Image (spheres, rainbow, N blue to C red):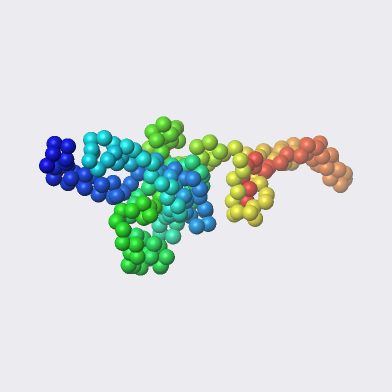
Amino acid sequence: MSEDSPDILDVLDLFGENLLNSIHTAMPGRVERYDPATQRADVQPLIRRRIPKSDTDRREWVYEDLPLIPSVRVLHPRGGGAFVHLPIATGDTVLLVFCEIGIGHWEAGDGSISDAGDERRHHLAHAVAIPGMYPASRNIPSVDANASELVIGFESGGARVRMKPNGDVQIDTTGTITLAGAAAAQFMARADRVDAELARIRNVLTGWTPVPNDGGLALKTTATTAFSSAQSTAADQVKGT
């Protein structure tokens, strides 16, 4: 064997490298398209694959982009009959996890034990996507990542729900909070405004001096003056039924 020819160890190393290159486990990916009806996305893997430049010189490497993976199942948090559906958008990054064998037959069934159908191992086609994989530069701001609270919200700050260990629930929003869905067309009453109106009525009644034989005219005049300007008791943001 010449000096330029690979020895058996080189051949085995190259075989092992090529084998590992075909085994995929997990890596970040970028959503290129998402269908909320099917909950599937076309995802671009974001880590290039390193491969030997040639079969005879494995000390030189080239890097190649992995292909776009179509129709990847997006795994939203779900269990016990409850779910959270995240508004997946183009450009979101996810964690691609490659199942060890094909899951197509199982997905098409009712969740029972199934044959694989696709017997390839750790293949790109076996990917599922888990939302929430982002680079460190896009960490959730610390003000919205209180270690003692469960926070649900938007990065833009549009609305946030904070569930606290003591049982309190705090909703931060500049929009409208609607209770009972679309049927809630009226704003709820605010306790402080109701109390203020009751106080005005109480002051009118306690401050009124009855006038004999006027048929309540004096009370009417006093009430008309006191309530000349309407005071709404409606809340500014909360609607209900």
Q: Foreground: 72 or 228? A: 72
Residue 84 location (% of width, % of height): 46, 51
Tell me if 206 is positioned left or right of 214 in this view: left
Q: Foreground: 41 or 67? A: 67
Tell me if 10 is positioned left or right of 125 in this view: left
Count of numbered marks: 0
Residue 232 location (% of width, % of height): 71, 41
Q: Quadrant of residue 117?
A: bottom left
| Residue at screen point 66% across, 46% down | 187
Q: Residue furthest front?
A: 2
| Residue at screen point 31% across, 53% down | 122
Q: Foreground: 69 or 81? A: 69
Residue 54 location (% of width, % of height): 27, 40
Whether residue 206 is visible to the viewer of this picture, yes or no, is no
| Residue at screen point 29% across, 41% down | 51
Tell me if 227 is positioned left or right of 136 in this view: right
